[in-house]
Amino acid sequence: MASANLNIMIKAARKAGRSLVKDFREVENLQVSAKGAGDFVSRADREAERIIKEELRGARPNYGWLGEETGAEPGEDPTRRWLVDPLDGTTNFLHGLPHWAVSIALEHKGEIVAAVVFDPAKDELFTAEKGDGAFMNDQRLRVSGRRNMIESIFATGVPFGGRGTLPATLADLARLMPVTAGVRRWGAAALDLAYVAAGRYDGYWERGINSWDVAAGILLVKEAGGFVEGLREGESALESGRIIAGNTQLFAPFAKLIRERD
Ligand code: LIP
């Protein structure tokens, strides 16, 4: 039985999703004009965040806010905060690739307690509340049961545009590729984590990620029986910008391999 807060989050995600689907159809027509699509997607992103903010702050005006497009705003209640990425997978959206999501998380006293990751293109709604499990379209989620790295696939984000984390990520890939069934780089961290929770990926890691990208996905993985940590033991995956997530059996060997460099 979803709580009132989770129902508010689902309503906001679906309303923003309807707006984004309409804009996504337009983007596909804009592929020919190099500049036009970029500006159009920025407007789509901001409109989605406006919709979500209106819904969430209308229902819970005293909660704090952190959104990718509008930044941080403290609330009268210092213990609760929304973390929102209105369009995770922006570059996919820009290029007409149907792999992007709305990500909404509720944080209470520094811990994520409710999560929604909505993929309108595939009509997959991932939800979780602390202690109540993780679901996709009301189907209970469990992380995969794979025990052997060589049978497992992992997701990550490969830095682009001169980001300083590229050498470390390439070194990760050089260590990981020979001992796994492969790596996927699909460009949306929220969905990468949702897919770990759903058992589609066996693990995910990324260096240089924003809290709003992963906040909801972190709870999905934990509520589906997986593990999530920062890149260094004891480091916060939410605040450090570096994350490792995996299923129950593989998290330890996977994290050990990624941490070899650090
Ligand atoms: C994206 C992340 C992805 C990362 C991209 C980008 P955005 O978020 O979800 O995992 O590799 O560089 O940061 O910018 O689409 O919200």
Image (cartoon, grey):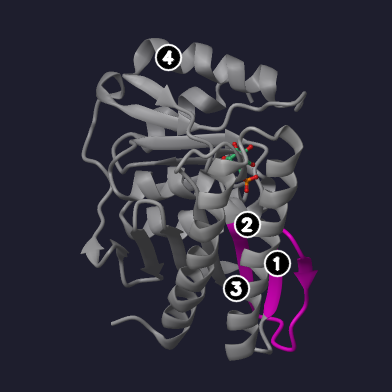
Q: Amino acid at mark 3?
A: Ile
Observer-side mark, 2 or 4, equals 2
Q: Is residue 239 left or right of residue 180?
A: right
Q: Earlier in the sequence, mark 2 or mark 3?
A: 3
From what the image shows, is residue 57 above or below residue 16? below
Element under label 4?
helix
Some atom of ligand 1 lies within 8 Å of the CB belonging to the residue at label 2 = yes
Q: Amino acid at mark 1?
A: Leu
Some atom of ligand 1 lies within 8 Å of the CB belonging to the residue at label 1 = no
Label 3 to label 1, Cα distance in Å?
A: 12 Å
Does 67 lie within the magenta span? yes
Task: Pinpoint residue 35: horizontal percent, then vertical percent.
Answer: 76, 37
Q: Is residue 35 left or right of residue 235?
A: right
Q: Earlier in the sequence, mark 1 or mark 4?
A: 1
Q: Earlier in the sequence, mark 2 or mark 1?
A: 1
Q: Earlier in the sequence, mark 3 or mark 1?
A: 3
Element under label 1?
strand
Q: Which residue is mark 3?
A: 52
